[in-house]
Image (cartoon, helix red, strand yellow):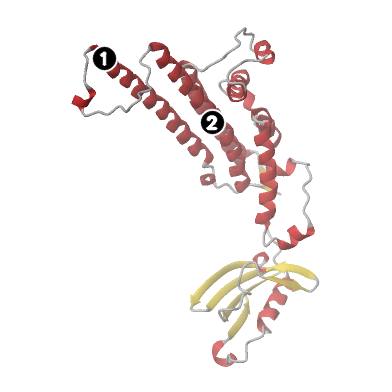
Amino acid sequence: MMEPAVLKMDNLKSHKRFIKEVGKLTYLYKTTVYSYNLTDRLLSIAKKNKVEWKDMELDLGDPFYHKNTEKSRLKTIKDLSEIIFVRIVSALEVFMIDLIRDIFIITKEPFKKNSNEIHFKHAELLSTRSLTDIYNKIINKEMRSLSSGGYKDIIKYFKQHFNIDLGNFTPGNSKMEEYHDRRHLLVHRLGRTDQLYRDKYNTKHTLISVEESYLMDCVNDFREFSTLLLNQVIYHLKNDIKSPSSKKVIESKYKIDVEVLKDINYLNSQFEFWAGDEYAVLSDILDFKKEIAENKFELLISGKERQINSYISFIHNVDIPDYVDPTKRYQFAATKIA
């Protein structure tokens, strides 16, 4: 029987980071434009009224590079809007990739659809202390590929792995593609259009820019788009993405009380041992561990009979240094509870 994936929605933090980043960039744009316009207006009034800056205890420095003209003001604001726009589009792509990483923490099921092979050397696998290293290599390889491919590859990935069609989201696929194409031209061609862009968007403009109204439309569209995407991800995690039961085989359960030496490591969850000819790790059978006093622990273990017996036998026969009195310094008891 299939069981719903275990959901921990607190892990979906990428959306909050994106909204915060867009807010910071919008604030930067508006406050900079306000400050620039205010400075420009102040300089115009000062020049008209022949104000002496020293009388106002202001030192503008020498030389003074501000060009107090309407043309200069508009160009500066245009340049600023382009820079902010490029950063916002990049932030959206980062959000989408980080959202995939968030999903990876919650469930691995959607990522099993990928048939790509990934190769490990023997040394890598034998040096791995946990699945963390393997998971890191898998997810980082996929995310690097998406970062290189850009927006189009990301939307394909969401469709393939999560059955989410981003092309249906507001403001629509054509407008979202235009945002990304414009960002590409601004970054790689300084805003000069190529024939592909002119044909695709039916324009004769050889140079594009970002007006304030366009920038604010982009901000609003991206906020709505990101919220729709987040809600769709949550919906699919709750309703569509299933994971097989990962319940382990339990043939017996034991409660173990043990007093240990400080240099003994067999209570570490990553402790490795042999159960006959089967390799095992304590985390496979460990359900609970609690330190009830200094160097005294209580454990609950469950699993296959062979693993349980091998681990208990190991603890019972563990070598104790000659300088330790086992009757006073070492205690061990294993009680079967199921």
At numbered mark 2, what does the secondary structure look like: helix, strand or loop? helix
Q: Residue at x 48, y 24 (%)?
A: 219
Residue 57 visible somewhere in the drawing: yes
Distance of label 2 from label 1 (alpha carbons): 47 Å
Is 141 positioned to the left or the right of 84 in the image? right
- Residue type, label 1: Lys
Q: Quadrant of the C terminus?
A: bottom right
Reply above or below: 60 against 322: above
Residue position marked by numbered label 2 in the rendering:
226
Q: Residues within 10 Å of mark 2 (few under 14, many from 20)?
A: many
Question: Given contact means CB atoms under 8 Å apart, are the residues at marks 2 and 1 in contact?
Answer: no
Image coordinates for residue 202, horizontal then vertical, percent: 64, 8
Give x and y (percent) for residue 54.
21, 26
- Name which residue lies at 35% across and 25% down: 63
Residue 195: x, y in percent? 68, 12
Please report the residue visible at 65 percent of the width from the left and 11 percent of the height from the top: 198
Of the numbered discs 2 and 1, the one sitting upstream in the chain is 1
Looking at the picture, does residue 140 appear above or below residue 335?
A: above
Left or right relative to 18: residue 246? right
The front one of 170 and 2 is 170
Q: Is 38 placed above or below 335 here? A: above
What residue do we see at 76% from left, 68% from top? 279
Say what amino acid the circle numbered 2 marks: Ser
- Give whichever of 68, 281 is nearer the camera: 68
Question: Residue under circle 1?
Answer: 47
